[in-house]
Each structure stands twice: as structure tokens, then as C-alpha cells.
Amino acid sequence: MRRFPVRLLAPAVAVLGGCAAPAGPAADAPASSAAQRYTVSTRVLEAPDHGPRLCAGLAVPAMAFSGPPWCDGPDVIGWDWAAVDGEESDEGTTWGEYRVVGTWDDGALTLTEPPGDPVPDVPREGDQSPGPEFATPCPAPDGGWGIVDPDTATLAGRDAANAYATEQPDLGSLWFDTEAELADVLPGVHEQAVLNANFTGDLERHARELRALYGGPLCVSRAPRSVQELDDVQERVHEALRVNALYYRVDMILGRVEVLVPVVDQAALDRAAQVDPEGIVELQGWLQPVP
């Protein structure tokens, strides 16, 4: 069954493509990223206007899905197309999917061993951040999640409640819990669900206002942070990591900002900490350290 956060993801600076995937948070950053070897499986692409690079951005065909692809990402130093197999070429652009290993320094990966076949990502214990929890945090009322007011337990009523919530400056998140067991069928409503809204401010007032608009299953709960707070943190981190961040994701339900960077080294941690003293930001590394 699906659950729908109304506002969960913030605009991404770039979207990963190829075989790469976001990694889990690094508890301990290498003291020197230049001395540490890193690996990733992704597309390597060389175009007439630049040398070989790792595709940290989505590889996109030039026009209408025709012609050679293009992508953005860090340079890879020491690349030799004669030493690899499986590449494709079109109009002066050459690309292929590979696993690369090298050292990271000054925004580029320097190869330390020959490239190999790409390796699918295998999640390891502790690697992945826990996903946002969309379950309804309120206890079910006596008699279950049923209709309180038949006149407003409608799609129009729920839309009005959604509109009210999204206009509140202290809104944290708004989502539908379709896995909750309902005591009544909501007439004319496609998604049979508990409407969830969390706020950082006056919960009693918000619950009263929302209930006046919507007579269906409703849960109003405390948000860890507001949308505005998280957006402000994201902006500060974006400025601090402008040249390094690959992707931003704002998780409104858990109240944090996830930022994907090429490597989680001490420099990245220090820059993030300067603008995020509360520890709201979670840095994740695209290039994974080689033990």
C-alpha cells in the first residue's frame, strides 16, 4: 500500500545516473582524502570539449534522445580508452560503464588500478539511512479511524485541509497513510487514508482548524522542524558546499537535510558544521572508501 508525503523532496542540484547510488553516512571521515582510495561504478564519458569524467549527473542524450549522451561530474585522471572494453562512440564522444578505483584530490579521481566491469551496489548493514516513517503517529481513536463528520469527510474537505496546512509557516510535513486500517469507507475519495499533518507550533489550534474543514481520519502531530527551517539549512549548506555537493534531499518527516558529496572527508564535514551547528545535515559519500 502506498503512503504519500505531500512535500518531502527538495529540488536536487544533480541526479545520479549510471550504476552509482547514494551511500550511507560516514561515521569517520578519512584524515586525508588524497591518501585514501575510493571506488564507484558509473559511466565514464569523454566529449570533444572535455576529457574523461565520471558521470555524477544523469547522462542525457543531446537532443530528443538522439545523438551522443552528455553528463557532468569530476574528472578522472589516468584514463586510457585503449585499456578498457565495452565503450561506445558517437560524434566524437566516447562512453562506457566501469568500476573505477583511485585517490581523490582537488576535485578529481586519479586512477590507481585498471578500470573493471561495473559492480551493482550491494547494501551493507549500516550503509543505508533509515527511510522516512510514514505511519500515523497518533493512536487510533475509540472505534478506529472512522468518519467524524459525514458532511466534510469528502475529497473537497480533504483538499481544503491540505490547502490550510500548506499555508502555515510552521508546517513540517503533510502525508497520507494508506496502510492505516479505516473503520469507515470515505465516499468519493480515491485514497482511503489517514490524513497526517505535523507542525512545530500550536497543535491544538491546527487540529481545531483542520477538523473544521475535514471530517475524515486525521492525525495532527509535532514536527521536529518546519519546512522553512529545513529550507534555510539547505540554502546555507548549498552555499558552503556549492562546488562539491551532487544532490540535496530534504526529509520533512524526519527533519533533516541529506547531502550527497563526492567524498565525506574532514573538509566537507567542517564546512557543513560551520553552517549547521545543530547537526541537521547528513553528509553521504558517492565515492566509497576502499578498505
Image (cartoon, rainbow, N blue to C red):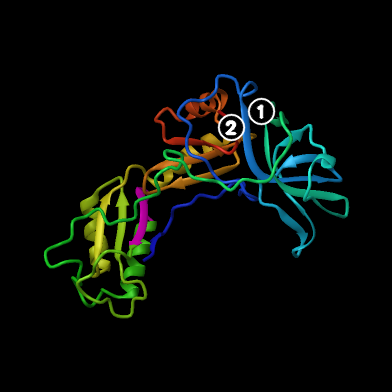
Number of other residues with Cα within 10 Å of mark 1, as a class: few under 14, some 14 to 19, many 20 or more: many
Answer with the quarter of the image where residue 134 lies.
bottom left
Residue ranking furthest to the bottom:
188
Q: Nearer the viewer, residue 112 or 206?
A: 112
User: Residue 263, which numbered label?
Assistant: 2
Q: Residue visible at 24% across and 50% down?
A: 203
Left or right side of 213 for 119: right
Number of other residues with Cα within 10 Å of mark 2, as a class: few under 14, some 14 to 19, many 20 or more: many
Is 240 a magenta residue? no
Where residue 233 appears, as percent x and y from the top left, is 47, 37
Where residue 106 appears, as percent x and y from the top left, is 69, 26
Residue type (three-letter) at the residue carrying disc 1: Trp
Q: Which image quarter is the N terminus in?
A: bottom left
Q: Nearer the viewer, residue 110 or 158?
A: 110
Q: Residue visible at 39% across and 30% down?
A: 278
Residue type (three-letter) at the residue carrying disc 2: Val
Q: Residue visible at 88% across and 50% down?
A: 92
Q: Nearer the viewer, residue 157 or 268?
A: 268
Residue ranking furthest to the left:
142
The vertical placement of 223 against 268, above or below, is below
Answer with the quarter of the image where residue 238 lies.
top right
Q: Earlier in the sequence, mark 2 or mark 1?
A: 1
Left or right side of 60 for 255: left
Region rendered in magenta: 167-176
Question: Would you name the residue on which mark 1 appears?
Answer: 104
Where disc 2 sits, the SS reads loop
Where disc 1 sits, the SS reads strand
Where residue 228 appears, as percent x and y from the top left, is 43, 45
C-alpha span from label 2 to label 1: 8 Å
Q: Residue visible at 38% across and 63% down?
A: 163
